[in-house]
Image (tube, grey):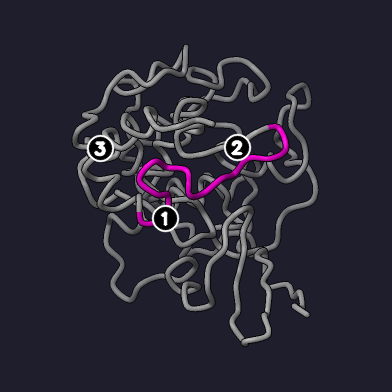
């Protein structure tokens, strides 16, 4: 019988053959992928720093294999709809489009009234790190250490992209991107895990499936962020080292794939 253990934030199964399989949310990866997912290369490139910082922005405790917060963030607006650990995610206040209350999160269940992070573009990394340690953000060394803080500061300062040429932030429709370029990238890279039609991985539930196409149509801003930075805690490639046109093309193509 398989035995369950806890490895930081990830849960893993030790199967009878001795293989260890880790899981984060609906994904699984092998023990051998742990370094790729959670460790830093000896000579980290700018592209890697931006991508890693983007994953921390998404969900820092899964990206960094840390303990998940239990309480609601003290600075999270009481009138807003969320509570608990999700309020500690940068994206929960500032949005996948980085525009906060001026973007997709201008209304709906994700509305907080908190501004975006555009003003921090090109800000010195030390200044961003200081802001994230202040009484408003309250990210401690135990949550995000100084080395890890440098990654998210790099993302905030030099990794934000303008999504408005590719996504209508009012309707959340995909409006740009070279679909033919995206098709080439998807078929030669993304299809290795997602399949040629994007249905090999399913994040759905009893209400229905959720494929790459489903997500690209419903939340293209989130998908574009993950194409650029990858999903935290899993063995996923990203396109951070390439011009934004490659990621935008993949998004445009993904939005044409099956949704159910």
Query: Which mark identifies residue 209?
Result: 2
Q: Is residue 96 visible?
A: no
- The residue to which callout 3 is attached is 182
Q: Is residue 198 left or right of residue 218?
A: left
Q: Position of residue 73 (x, y in %)?
A: 73, 41
Q: What is the distance, in whole Å, between disc 2 and disc 3 at their CAs?
A: 23 Å
- Residue plotted at (60% across, 46% down): 134
**Going from the N terminus, do you reach mark 1 or mark 3 first?**
3
Q: Position of residue 227 (x, y in %)?
A: 38, 44
- The residue to which callout 1 is attached is 193
Rendered position, 107 above or below 211: above
Q: Quadrant of residue 254?
A: top left
Look at the image and tell me in which quarter the N terminus lies.
Answer: bottom right
Q: Secondary structure at mark 2?
A: loop
Q: Secondary structure at mark 1?
A: helix
Q: What is the distance, in whole Å, between disc 2 and disc 1 at their CAs?
A: 17 Å
Q: Is residue 249 visible?
A: yes
Magenta-drawn segment: 192-207
Q: Residues within 10 Å of mark 3 (few under 14, many from 20)?
A: many
**Going from the N terminus, do you reach mark 2 or mark 1 first?**
1
Q: Position of residue 251 (x, y in %)?
A: 35, 33
Q: What is the distance, in whole Å, between disc 1 and disc 3 at their CAs?
A: 16 Å
Magenta run includes residue 204: yes
Q: Main secondary structure of the magenta part?
A: loop
């Amino acid at each position: 019988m398989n035995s369950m253990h806890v490895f930081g934030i990830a849960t893993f199964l030790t199967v009878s053959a001795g293989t260890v399989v880790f899981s984060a949310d609906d994904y699984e990866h092998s023990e051998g992928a742990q370094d790729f997912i959670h460790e830093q290369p000896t000579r980290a490139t700018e592209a890697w720093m931006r991508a890693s910082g983007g994953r921390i922005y998404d969900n820092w405790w899964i990206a960094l294999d840390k303990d998940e917060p239990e309480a609601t963030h003290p600075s999270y607006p009481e009138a807003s709809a969320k509570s608990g650990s999700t309020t500690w995610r940068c994206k929960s206040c500032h949005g996948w489009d980085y525009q906060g209350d001026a973007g997709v999160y201008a209304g709906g269940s994700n509305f907080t009234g908190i501004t975006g992070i555009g003003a921090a573009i090109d800000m010195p990394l030390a200044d961003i790190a200081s802001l994230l340690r202040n009484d408003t953000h309250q990210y401690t060394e135990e949550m995000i250490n100084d080395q890890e803080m440098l990654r998210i500061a790099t993302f905030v300062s030099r990794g934000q992209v303008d999504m408005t040429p590719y996504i209508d932030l009012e309707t959340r429709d995909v409006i740009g991107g070279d679909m033919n370029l995206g098709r080439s990238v998807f078929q030669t890279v993304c299809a290795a895990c997602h399949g040629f039609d994007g249905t090999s991985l399913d994040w759905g539930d009893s209400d229905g499936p959720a494929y790459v196409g489903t997500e690209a149509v419903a939340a293209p801003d989130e998908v574009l962020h993950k194409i650029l930075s990858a999903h935290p805690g899993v063995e996923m490639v990203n396109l951070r080292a390439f011009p934004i046109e490659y990621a935008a093309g993949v998004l445009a193509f993904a939005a044409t794939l099956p949704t159910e």
